[in-house]
Image (tube, grey):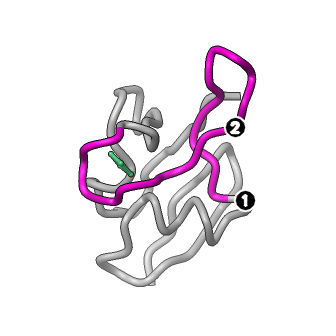
Amino acid sequence: MIELQINGQALRVSPGTSVAAALYLAGDGSSRTSVNGQRRAPLCGMGICQECRVTIDGQRRLACQTSCSAGMQVETQP
Ligand code: FES
């Protein structure tokens, strides 16, 4: 198991788990808030829709295209 942080909360996942899957394991799976105030979550799972944008270690990344790694800091958009 590897441990990462999602919005400051520790989460342990199996190696190879995508950050998108980790978002669901950590809570409601949401990744960001739309300009209309609606919560958004990973939709396509293959890098097309861009709904899974999160900040990982200070850089904007797609959660569905990123595997979790030890010590990773993931922040969703409030
Ligand atoms: S879920 Fe669509 S780009 Fe990541």
Is 5 one of the magenta-colored residues?
A: no
Rendered-image quadrant of the N terminus = bottom left
Label 1 sits on residue: 28
SS under mark 1:
loop
Write down the residue under mark 2. Answer: 39
The circle on residue 75 is: none
Whether residue 37 appears in magenta in the rendering, the answer is yes
Mark 1: give few (<14), some (14-19) or many (20+) Cα within 10 Å. few
Residue at image position (37%, 66%) is: 18
**Foreground label between 2 and 1:** 2
SS state under label 2: strand
The answer to the question of whether label 2 and label 1 lie on touching residues, with beta carbons closer than 8 A, is yes
Q: Which residue lies furthest to the top in this view?
A: 35
In the rendered structure, which amino acid carries the disc numbered 1?
Answer: Asp
Q: Main secondary structure of the magenta part?
A: loop
Residues drawn in magenta = 29-49
Picture quadrant where residue 44 is located:
bottom left
